[in-house]
Image: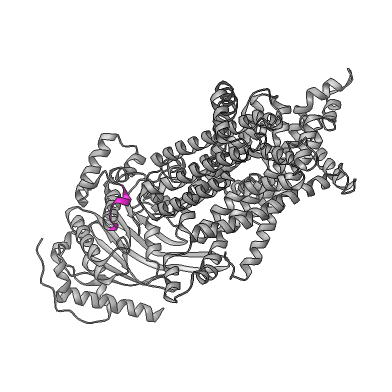
Amino acid sequence: MQAVAPEAPALTDVRTLSRQAAPPSESQSRSAETVIEARNLGVTFAAHGHVTVALTGVDLAIRKGEFVSLIGPSGCGKTTLLRLIADLTQATSGLLTVNGMTPAEARRRRTYGYVFQAPALYPWRNVESNVMLPLEVLGMPREERLRRAARVLDLVGLSEFRRRFPWQLSGGMQQRASIARALSFEPSLLLMDEPFGALDEITRDGLTMHLHGLWCRTDLTAVFVTHSVPEAVFLSTRIVVMSSRPGRVVAVIDSRLPRERGLDVRETPEFLTLAHDVRAALREGHEDG
Amino acid sequence: MTRVLPVLCVLVVVISVWFAASVPMNWSQAQALADDNASWTDIAEATQSLDRPLLPTPAQVATEMVTTLVDYPVTSPRSLLHHALITAWESLVGLLISLAAGIALAIGIVHVRTLDRTLMPWLVASQAIPVLAIAPMVVVVLGNIGLTGLLPKALIAGWLSFFPITTGMVKGLRSSDVMQRDLMHTYNATTAQVFTKLRWPASMAFLFPALKVAAPLALVGAIVAELPTGAQAGLGARLLTGSYYGLTLQIWAALLMAGLLAVLAIALIDGAQVLLVRGRGGRL
Amino acid sequence: MITTLLLLLSLLIGTVALVLLSRNDARAFRIATPVVFGVLVLWLWQLACVGYQIPFILLPPPSNIGVAIATHIPMLAADFRQTVLRSVIPGWLIGSGAGLLVAIALDRSPFLRRGVLPLGSLVSSMPIVGIAPIMVMWFGFDWQSKAAVVVAMTFFPMLVNAGAGLAQTGAMEADLMRTYAAGYRTTLLKLRLPSALPFIFNALKLNATLALIGAIVAEFFGTPIVGMGFRISTEAARLDLGIVWAEIVVAATVGTLSFALLSLLERAVTFWHPSYH
């Protein structure tokens, strides 16, 4: 894939950035299938007499192979949106399909892998056994399980540590194991809820690079919740900016960065402009809300 | 309401099952006592009012309790209240002794390393030892040197409740954060000040749960301590005499009374906790 | 006179030794300190009994207890068999097992759980050992009634603890199972029961002590002519305190050994729990 020379950045109203021309190397993906489609999606919670509008009027289409970040302040509904896709929460209005099915059906068919904010590894299982957990639930035979676990541990670079127990690993390694687990049954969709939030910056950089490399090498579609602007800009092909009160989508920004990137892209003017645009959108959302 | 309703439902179910079970369980006895031409319903009715049933009905137990509580003066040995008060008093005295001793020892253990290293392992080990087994011996020996009545029972009750109180208090006095202790250090606080301002308030969260374990233990201790002296007074004595003379209803009434005493003790401790908590912003 | 001097001297030397031993943090010293304390107590006890000529019917010296143990091994063994092997162990297994099964059954219904667990916790604070005379009426004088008492005593602590253990499953870990579309049974077996194991072991250890106490005390209420509780109550009444102490030593040993065994098992099974690292 070749990098395309970016156009001179125009500091226009952020909403017009949503329909920027995509670089030619991605033209295939424009006609690629839609993996996730949301139309006028909304979630309202009612508890103890209070009504909370967690999410309202979300229109979004995510295509195969994209890396989409959901970014916004706390309470903007980004985790709620992710949980809706995962069928961990149910919508109260609007439409949501995953791979053409309802989220519940997609969950039953184990369409996606989910990575939580904390590793959520089961402490009584070693790393290999944790990674094989979904495969056990699926009822895969033992040889198959071992083979897949070995492959996916190799992918995240934890093969040496497969017999260790979670508490024997650092936070970053535990989170890598958690990602390996999410990939072990080879889902086409990866859902991640601020997976690197609890880690220090140096570890985070390493893991971000790792995750990016992983996504480049496979044809995963990824939806990634974060509150870090540099992280969103570095990883994504598209950035969905959200804001709170009520939770909603404020802007959708396409990334002009090349598909494959190194960490030094963070110092390029394109990166900085994109980050600027995202921050501008966040500010606007904050002022409106 | 969501907390009370399930409990009430379960209670209703339990009492209904109890009533229902009393029929088959008392059947053979009722049948043996009945006339030859008695019908099924006659026998079923009889199961509800036997003198020495295998399983008394809730109604029978309740009646027995009420009669023996109310119909006799408190001073009479036929009054259930008389025996309940005796046992309650023995437990209370024992609990107070162990409270004083336990707190004192816990303070010692936390502040004096020798005491900690010497005694804590034994306190922990005591959890595994059936300390109640010494009750008969203690009661008999004390009786032989002329100490009868309240003292041996209170001592056994106190002995049993001593261990949870001490271990709970040690844990509680040690429960404060390193950071909280460091703060005191920056104020150059004396050991006594650290104790009164930090360790003691922090230990309350452990003292009350420990009391809720210790109080029932004191009660059991008092009841068991009443057995060896040929059963003179108290709920334990009542259980034993009921057992010797086959007075089923007396046994059940004494048992339920003991249960009620335990529930009352826990309620009182909870009440004390609420009062304490009010001055501390709602949390232990 | 001499006795008093010896006692004070021993006390002095012992205290100094203990203070010195306590200064060292090494593991060997941490074990030695309480052991030295135990030896000191035994020594002072022996000295006082012999020196002051305390009557045996009041307090026998350790030497007398040792002799009592050595000369009554068949009787002690028979009592052990009756109480521990026939009443304690079956009662503990059945009571704990039933408590666990009921806790799992209740797990399905939050309503029932809210009803049963508070009642269970209340009942476990009642002197359940008092049902011994009733159990004798139902099951006869022999070990069966004592085992029944043990079942009743061990049921509720296990019910309450296992219930608490099953209820505290992490939300994230449970969500993970949902993303695998795992059913109730899979989630129970692969997540909730393993994570409840520390609570279950807590109850098992507690129940071991309760079972032993329950069986012995239940025998105070009447039993055929064998059993640890029987021996303690009858020999105490006859003032043959040597045998009483001997039985207590056996009971204490059984209690400690079972606690140690359970702790070892617990460590092997719940090695992953934060309290071990």
Q: Nearer the viewer, residue C242 or C149?
A: C242
Looking at the picture, how far across and down is residue C18, in whole percent? 45, 51
* Residue C80 higher or lower than A188, as above or below: above
A254 left or right of C172?
left
Identify the magenta region. Answer: A165-171
Specify the quadrant of the image occupied by residue C32. Answer: top left
The residue located at (69%, 46%) in the rendering is: B219
Q: Nearer the viewer, residue B10 or C136?
A: C136
Q: Is residue C123 visible?
A: yes
* Residue B235 higher or lower than A86, as above or below: above
Colouring rule applied to residues: one colour
Specify the quadrant of the image occupied by residue C210. Answer: top right
Q: Quadrant of the C terminus of chain A?
A: bottom left
Looking at the picture, how far across and down is residue B190, in whole percent? 48, 72
The residue located at (63%, 69%) in the rendering is: B278
Looking at the picture, how far across and down is residue A69, in whole percent? 29, 65
Looking at the picture, how far across and down is residue C251, in whole percent? 56, 33
A92 left or right of B64?
left
Residue that extends furthest to the top in the rendered view of this protein: B36
Q: Nearer the viewer, residue B1 or C90?
A: C90
B40 left or right of C146?
right
Q: Is residue C207 visible?
A: no
The answer to whether residue C153 is magenta is no
Q: Quadrant of the N terminus of chain A?
A: bottom left
Q: Nearer the viewer, residue B60 or A131?
A: B60
The residue located at (37%, 72%) in the rendering is: A73
